[in-house]
Amino acid sequence: MIVLDSSKKRYRLRIIVPAYPAFNVYSHIAKRTTALGPVCVAGAANKMEKWDVEVIDENNLRRFGPKNESGRANHEFMQRQRPADVVGFYGGLTSTIPRLYEVAQFYKDKGAVTIAGGQHFVEDNIAEALSSGIDYVVIGEAEETIRELLRAIEGKLPPSIVKGIAYLHNGELVRTAEREPVTDFEKLPVPDFSLVRHAMINIFPVERIRGCGMNCEFCTVKGRPRCAKPERLLEQISSLIETHNAKHFFVVDDLFGQQRDETIRFCNMLSNYQKRIGRRLDITVQIRLDKAKDRELLSAMLQAGVQTVAIGFESPIEEELNAMKKRVSAGDMLSLAKTFRKFGFLVHGMFIFGYPLKEGNFTMSATERVGRFRNFIRKAKIDTVQILLAVPLPGTELRRRLGEQGRIYPLQDVGWEYYDGNFPLFEPDPPMTAEQMQAGARKVMGRFYRFRYLFFVALKIFSFPGLIFFFHNIKAGWQRWYRGWRNHLIRFVGWVTIRKWTLEFKKDNFLQKLQAAQEHLRRSLK
């Protein structure tokens, strides 16, 4: 048991969001936002006596952020200037785990107590963490656990009575009793983004509902949805407006509108709030396609300032939808997507290319899959798209199934750092190869995000005076012009992003690692 120096008057907890292993499709947006989980945990710990708490997001160090020669966070400097007694690590993204272990070992060598939590740490990964520089692993939600664990580290509690943690005692793994998920959110403090140091945040994550009952086999978010009152979400938004002059918000609930009547009530409350303060907000939500049938809900969302809906289409191929346990057909997806657009929402479509089937004789080539995706995106007139490969994340049914089939590439060849949706991690369904699967996803993205849209942006600017022809309805004319200008600009920026990612990919020599992984997989199956 590690106990802090009791003679100290105050202790410091530093929570770190590890950097992405390399440039990827998330890098641009990561410089404008941060993860909500670490902020929630930091806020809970910051209420404790004798504790000062801060959050460092390595992906967002734009304001006087201490960086080393390689451009990464300079933890040597931070620990010298503001020594942390305990350092927590956010393990919500599997691709950042190698970086997490690297930084954790640095702090452990400096004498700090290290804690890690997040959705990566399930089953076998707990032992992995405890042998990689982590002293304590928090299992499940951490707002309540962190308070008890810090008291244990102070020497005020035995760690064995702290619920929801794992640690080593005399070389043996100890797992304490599970902690029930939070249901009473009113007892938790409102997330305090002032605890995030060195960051420039202009898109603020907020939440009302945790959990999701859809049970998709590739997703780590499970369980019955647990909902806070709409007033709590409004309080988060209003507090951020007052303290950070916030305008852009992302509601991180997995499915906005799960609690329909309360969601509509929240939208009405938020609409009235904006009228009172004389300010229009920009809100993005994740939502199910079938909510397009609920016109009352859509109208309330528009009035509340919801401009963008992020929708998990996943695939336009029926067999893949069935394997994912999606409860919608490709034909229905097309008509429902158009409904969202007709209402005036910007639609961000999220897709998974090359999803592995459970069984059956499905022999679609990569070329035909690319065509199916392109046609669907064109017909649905989706504003922005994200095409990723399936990721067998720890703790998911997908990883269990592919593992039993002997299809997952060994971690010794294709490590956790590649688990970001941009790399093939398993043997795909024949006749498609892993190389073709990765190239296919890039072809779909490459057709959507192109250099030529830079010229379309210029044409849109020159066409701006044409809004005079909409003098009878200036608002409709503006919305039509802005939507086109915005989409063209994003498609050009997307082209720049893909080009930069391609250069990083070539430097990494991933194809050589992939060939080694395929060879090791073949040998293990003989």
Image (spheres, rainbow, N blue to C red):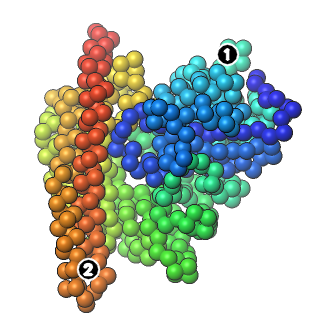
Q: Position of residue 16 (x, y in %)?
A: 58, 38
- The reply to whether callout 2 and callout 1 are in contact (CB within 8 Å) is no
Q: Characterize the local packing of mark 1: few (<14), some (14-19) or many (20 or more) Cα atoms within 10 angstroms.
A: few
Mark 1 lies on a secondary structure that is: strand
Q: Is residue 438 left or right of residue 271?
A: left
Q: Is residue 79 left or right of residue 223?
A: right
Mark 2 lies on a secondary structure that is: helix
Residue in the image at 25% along x and 24% along y? 511
Residue in the image at 29% along x and 16% along y? 516
For mark 1, what is the residue?
172
User: Quick one: 466 or 181, which is closer to the camera?
Assistant: 466
Q: Is residue 200 among the parts visible in the rendering? A: yes
Q: Characterize the local packing of mark 2: few (<14), some (14-19) or many (20 or more) Cα atoms within 10 angstroms.
A: some
Amino acid type of disc 2?
Answer: Gly
Amino acid type of disc 1?
Answer: Glu
Q: How many marks?
A: 2
Q: Is residue 69 left or right of residue 357?
A: right
Quarter of the N terminus within the rendering: top right
Q: Position of residue 414 (x, y in %)?
A: 36, 23
User: Quick one: 388 or 4, which is closer to the camera?
Assistant: 4
Residue in the image at 65% along x and 45% along y? 54
Q: Position of residue 278 (x, y in %)?
A: 52, 80
Residue, far bottom: 472
Residue, far right: 7
Q: Say which mark, if any, is on residue 477.
A: 2
Task: Give the mark nearer the N terminus: 2 vs 1.
Answer: 1
> Does 438 appear above or below 242?
above
Q: Position of residue 412 (x, y in %)?
A: 40, 17
Residue in the image at 31% along x and 13% along y? 520
